[in-house]
């Protein structure tokens, strides 16, 4: 959960973002919360996730 409204940021359609979770090294207790806006009936959304697994 975010602590202040000024912490909320947005990206535009077609933008690329790197969203780091709490398990990302150096990002402990600072994971991102992602919320997508609703889409219209019949529209589709593409979400690509890549999970890094250290050796």
Image: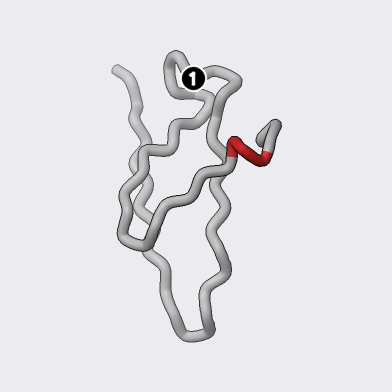
From this view, report whether residue 50 is shown above or below residue 42. above
The image shows residue 28, relative to residue 43, as above or below, that is: above
Residue sticking out furthest to the bottom? 42
**Mark count:** 1
User: Between residues 28 and 54, which one lies in front from this camera angle?
Assistant: 28
Q: Quadrant of the N terminus?
A: top right
- Residue 48 placed where, x, y %? 35, 52
Q: What colour scheme governs how the chains and residues are painted in the rendered image of this protein?
A: secondary structure
Above-or-below relation of 45 to 19: below
Label 1: few (<14), some (14–19) or many (≥20) C-alpha neighbours in 10 Å:
few
> In the figure, 15 relative to 32: above or below?
below
Residue at image position (53%, 84%) is 41
State the quadrant of the C terminus: top left
Q: What element carries label 1?
A: loop
Q: Which residue is drawn at 59% across and 36% down?
A: 7
Measured as percent of width and height from the top left, residue 38 is found at 57, 69
When asked about the image quadrant of residue 26, the answer is: top left
The x, y position of residue 39, in whole percent, is: 52, 73
Which quadrant of the view contains residue 29?
top right
Q: Residue furthest top?
A: 26
- Residue located beneath label 1 in the image: 27
Is residue 1 found left or right of 32 in the rendered image?
right
Q: Residue at x 69, y 34 (%)?
A: 4
- In the image, 5 versus 28, the foreground residue is 5
Name the residue at the front extreme: 6
Q: Position of residue 43 (x, y in %)?
A: 44, 80
Q: Residue at x 52, y 80 (%)?
A: 40
């Amino acid at each position: 959960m975010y602590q202040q409204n000024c912490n909320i940021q947005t990206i535009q359609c077609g933008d690329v973002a790197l969203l780091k979770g709490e398990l990302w090294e150096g990002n402990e207790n600072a994971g991102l919360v992602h919320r997508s806006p609703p889409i219209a009936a019949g529209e589709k959304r593409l979400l690509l996730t890549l999970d890094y697994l250290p050796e």
